[in-house]
């Protein structure tokens, strides 16, 4: 029996490998020209600083399986169901794939920092995103666009998350730990720099996260200031001047920075809604795909035979994504070997 998996990020790749191992044939569709999804944007992963490229290579090797057909540079644009359990997935190259089950593993997209105009992204050149900082790590240089080495760096948490002004109420779950990982990496490259994290709450839910937070304070002299950024401007030296209300001491704070890093949050991937909508699968108000049941049916959708895996349903770290993908593979096998499918 054939299964179509939409999305060749960690979730889709892991599920493809598991399902092929169970003897199914799998069409894995990825709209970019390589697999690995958002992992291709990261240099080293929290919590253990494993190179993201190693994980991507591992996923690629697993896909080298005779049961898996890869369709890269190809977007899935719609799903139809002609009879119960008979699905057709239309691709951007006009091919149609037929399958007995479909797995949505369409992932997430990063928040567009330009939507928070008051932070000056795209206007002030010393304001960059966490994804752009990863790029600097990959190139082993923290030089700003002006060529200087920053001496005072500020990480701004919750950019595009937990923000009613832009109607994103959810917490992206991973940007606090990413800020800590990145602050430590900056410290290692710039031992003399002053490094600040401006946060609303520190959310350290995963294994090793709280320990890394402690290490950042005790061993790396990273300063944590509780307060939300209200305004950013540029001074005559080209530095970014920020205003923050320090909510622990109850005083406003002004500081000039050589580099300001926006911890951009996770939003639903653009195509998820279209695909889910084509088979009447509901979404959460923030655009992530709504599972059949938030407790007992997290890989299931309102449409039997269509499943989800990974961060297309909510922000998720890599560990949880891979676990979710294996769970989805098991759910698909259960569905395909169930009484209706014999
Ligand atoms: C700033 C930041 C840093 C992070 N760092 C870490 C870290 O250090 N450690 C960690 O554990 N986690 C980290 N994460 C989380 C990690 O990126 C995710 O857990 C992981 O990428 C989720 O995998 P996924 O397959 O669900 O989604 P994605 O990685 O988003 O992959 C989805 C794939 O689906 C494809 N796709 C979407 N729609 C279609 C379509 N219609 N047709 C075809 N293909 C489609 C996309 O092109 C993409 O390749 C970080 C997240 C952020 C925001
Ligand atoms: S993980 Fe931290 S930075 Fe990210 S949205 Fe949640 S509280 Fe804000």
Image (cartoon, rainbow, N blue to C red):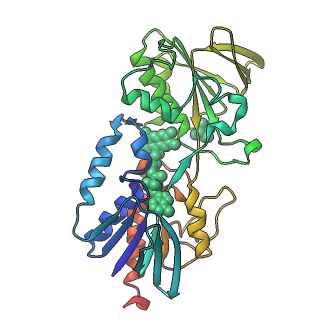
Is residue 291 shown to the viewer in this render?
no
Is residue 133 shown to the viewer in this render?
yes
Image quadrant in which the C terminus is located: bottom left
Q: Nearer the viewer, residue 90 or 229?
A: 90
Q: How many marks?
A: 0
> Could you say which quadrant of the image residue 294 lies in?
bottom right
Residue 157 location (% of width, % of height): 61, 32
Residue 258 location (% of width, % of height): 57, 15
Residue 317 drawn above or below residue 338:
above
In the figure, is residue 226 to the left or right of 327?
right
Residue at 48% in and 71% down = 307
Image quadrant in which the N terminus is located: bottom left
Seen as rendered, the residue at the extreme front is 93
In the figure, is residue 163 to the left or right of 88?
right
Residue 129 drawn above or below residue 165:
above
Residue 257 drawn above or below residue 319:
above
Residue 191 location (% of width, % of height): 42, 11
In the figure, is residue 203 to the left or right of 168?
left
Residue at 27% in and 60% down = 63
Residue at 35% in and 41% down = 52
Residue 215 location (% of width, % of height): 45, 24
Residue at 40% in and 78% down = 334
């Amino acid at each position: 029996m054939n299964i179509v998996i939409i999305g060749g990020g960690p979730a889709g790749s892991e599920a493809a490998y598991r399902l092929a191992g169970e003897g199914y044939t799998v069409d894995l569709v990825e709209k970019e020209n390589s697999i690995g999804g958002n992992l291709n944007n990261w240099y080293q992963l929290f919590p253990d600083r494993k190179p993201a490229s190693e994980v991507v290579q591992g996923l690629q090797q697993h896909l080298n399986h005779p049961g898996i057909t890869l369709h890269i540079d190809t977007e899935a644009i719609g799903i139809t169901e002609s009879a119960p359990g008979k699905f057709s997935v239309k691709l951007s190259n006009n091919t149609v794939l037929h399958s007995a089950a479909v797995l949505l593993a369409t992932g997430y997209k990063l928040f567009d920092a330009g939507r928070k105009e008051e932070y000056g992204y795209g206007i002030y050149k010393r304001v960059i995103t966490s994804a752009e900082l990863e790029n600097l790590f990959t190139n082993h240089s923290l030089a700003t666009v002006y060529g200087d080495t920053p001496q005072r760096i500020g990480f701004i948490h919750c950019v595009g998350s937990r923000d009613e002004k832009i109607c994103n109420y959810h917490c992206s779950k991973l940007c606090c730990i990413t800020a800590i990982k990145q602050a430590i990496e900056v410290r290692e490259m710039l031992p003399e720099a002053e490094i600040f994290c401006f946060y609303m709450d520190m959310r350290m839910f995963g294994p090793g996260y709280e320990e890394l937070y402690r290490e950042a304070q005790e061993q790396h002299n990273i300063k944590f200031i509780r307060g939300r950024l209200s305004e950013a401007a540029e001074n005559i030296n080209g530095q970014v001047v920020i205003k923050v209300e320090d909510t622990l001491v109850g005083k406003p704070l002004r500081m000039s920075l050589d580099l300001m890093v926006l911890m951009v949050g996770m939003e639903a991937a653009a195509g998820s809604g279209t695909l889910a909508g084509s088979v009447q699968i509901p979404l959460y108000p923030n655009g992530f795909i709504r599972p059949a049941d938030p407790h007992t049916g997290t890989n299931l959708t309102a449409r039997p035979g269509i499943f989800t895996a990974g961060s297309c349903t909510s922000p998720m770290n890599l560990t949880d994504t891979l676990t979710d993908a294996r769970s989805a593979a098991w759910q698909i096998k259960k569905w395909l070997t169930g009484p209706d499918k014999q």
